[in-house]
Amino acid sequence: MFTAQGIGLFPAPKKITFKCSCPDWAVMCKHVAAVLYGIGARLDEDSTLFFTLRAVDIHDLISKAIQSKTQTMLSKSGAKSRRILEDADIAGMFGVEVEAML
């Protein structure tokens, strides 16, 4: 969701550009560095600003993620897992007898 190429929330490295009108010919002049530092400081204070910058409603994102995960879990709920140990396997593995639940 966050890093999926082309659709993730993080921009691709080639989509991030820096531009400053100062006479410094460095790719990242002190002005760009200062702006990036300021953005980082603001994001440290309030990480939800990242979603605002990307025009994403965080409540909608969480709701969709929960709904998607719930649907996946419900669709698999009828299938018996192959990862369940039988009582005899548990007894042999841990050296204890497992009593039947009433």
Image (spheres, rainbow, N blue to C red):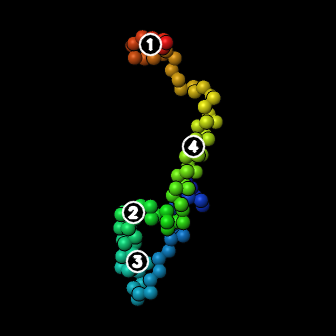
Q: Position of residue 86 (x, y in %)?
A: 52, 17
Q: Residues within 10 Å of mark 3 (few under 14, many from 20)?
A: some
Q: From the viewer's perspective, is the residue at label 1 or at label 2 nearer?
A: 2
Residue 43 in sight here: yes
Residue 33 in sight here: no
Q: Position of residue 13 (x, y in %)?
A: 51, 66
Residue drawn at (40%, 70%), measured in percent from left and top? 39
**Image vertical order of residue 20 relative to residue 93, above or below:** below
Q: From the viewer's perspective, is the residue at label 4 or at label 3 nearer?
A: 4
Question: CA–CA distance between discs 4 and 3?
Answer: 40 Å
Question: CA–CA distance between discs 1 and 2?
Answer: 51 Å
Label annotation for residue 69: 4
Tell me the residue that label 1 is attached to: 98
Label annotation for residue 46: 2
**Image vertical order of residue 96 relative to residue 72, above or below:** above
Q: Position of residue 18 (x, y in %)?
A: 47, 77
The quadrant in which residue 49 appears is bottom left
Compared across the picture, whether 23 is left or right of 88 comes to left
Label annotation for residue 32: 3
**Does the CB distance between marks 2 and 4 fall below 8 Å?**
no
Compared across the picture, whether 52 is left or right of 95 comes to right
Q: Earlier in the sequence, mark 1 or mark 4?
A: 4
Q: Earlier in the sequence, mark 1 or mark 2?
A: 2
Q: From the viewer's perspective, is the residue at label 2 or at label 3 nearer?
A: 2
Q: Residues within 10 Å of mark 2 (few under 14, many from 20)?
A: few
Residue drawn at (39%, 85%), measured in percent from left and top? 24
Q: Position of residue 17 (x, y in %)?
A: 50, 74
Q: Amino acid at mark 2?
A: Asp
Residue drawn at (52%, 65%), measured in percent from left and top? 54
The quadrant in which residue 76 appears is top right
Question: CA–CA distance between discs 1 and 4?
Answer: 33 Å
